[in-house]
Each structure stands twice: as structure tokens, then as C-alpha cells.
Image (cartoon, rainbow, N blue to C red):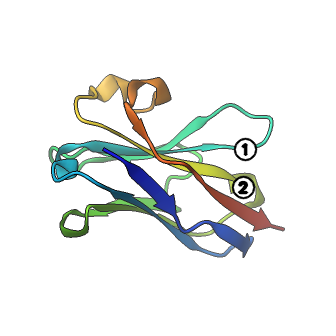
Amino acid sequence: VQLQASGGGLVQAGGSLRLSCTASGRTFSTYTVGWFRQAPGNEREFVAALRWNGGRTYYADSVKGRFTISRDNAKLTYFLQMNSLKPEDTAVYYCAADRSIILSDIGRGDAYDYWGQGTLVTVSS
């Protein structure tokens, strides 16, 4: 599976962006996909995830109510809709995928086998 993240850019605080994660591979719809981010000088952190089995979603507390993860199975694409953006959301955002991740590991980056290249989101104050 190869992942391609896109959609980053510069936005003012309070604005919105939608990130996309497109994958190759016909079985991508059976993968759990997560979004992670890493700000300069910070460790990578979990943002959101969507399990393929049942479609349940999970969010970091810092983005709950503002970010929404979704998917388009036909297009093999996952989205991260980011609303009410804050300067502290500035980071490189990565999508990751795994076919057999367990629920307790869904927020752990090292549990995902496949990663996209990252897309930069900059939120100005």
C-alpha cells in the first residue's frame, strides 16, 4: 500500500482545511487509517483514526469537535476535515494505514505499517 497525503496549506485561525489520503491497492478499504501530526520540535502525535471494520472513529482530545475523519471507499481516499483551526494545529500531517491494528494501538504511530509523505498545515493567528 502506498499512501499520498495532500491538502495542506496556509490558513488563518478559525478557518478550515480538508486533507486527503489516497492509497494504491485494491484492499485499502479493509485498512484502518490514522492521521498523525508533528510540529517542529515536538513528537509525532495522534490526531484521528477510522477503523475499516464498522467505520468507528477516534479522535485526540485536542481535536474533538473540530476535526472529522471520513472515507470514500470507491475512491480509496480518506479525508480529515479540519474546522476552527488554531495556531497550535500547525504541523506536518501524515496519514498512516494498517490492516491488522488492534484497538488499543490505534493511537500509536509505531503500530501502523504504511505511511504517507506528509502535508504541511500552517495556521496563522
Residue 101: where, in percent of width, then height?
28, 28
Left or right: 16, with 65 as reference point: right
For residue 103, above or below residue 40 = above
Cα–Cα span, label 2 and label 1: 6 Å
Visible in this render: residue 49?
yes
Q: Residues within 10 Å of mark 1 (few under 14, many from 20)?
A: some
State the residue at coordinates (34%, 23%). 104
For residue 110, above or below residue 46 = above
Q: How many marks do you count on the picture?
A: 2
Q: Tell me the quarter of the picture where residue 51 sits.
A: top left
State the residue at coordinates (57%, 72%). 17
- Give whichever of 4, 31 is nearer the camera: 4
Q: Are marks 2 and 1 in contact (CB under 8 Å)?
A: yes
Q: Tell me the quarter of the picture where residue 53 sits.
A: top left
State the residue at coordinates (17%, 45%). 30
Mark found first going from the N terminus, 2 or 1: 1
Left or right: 71, with 67 as reference point: left
Residue 18: where, in percent of width, then height?
50, 70
Q: Quadrant of the C terminus?
A: bottom right
- Label 2 residue SS: loop
The residue indicated by pointer 1 is 39
Q: Amino acid at mark 2?
A: Thr
For residue 110, above or below residue 53 = above
The residue indicated by pointer 2 is 90
Q: Residues within 10 Å of mark 2 (few under 14, many from 20)?
A: many
Q: Amino acid at mark 1?
A: Ala
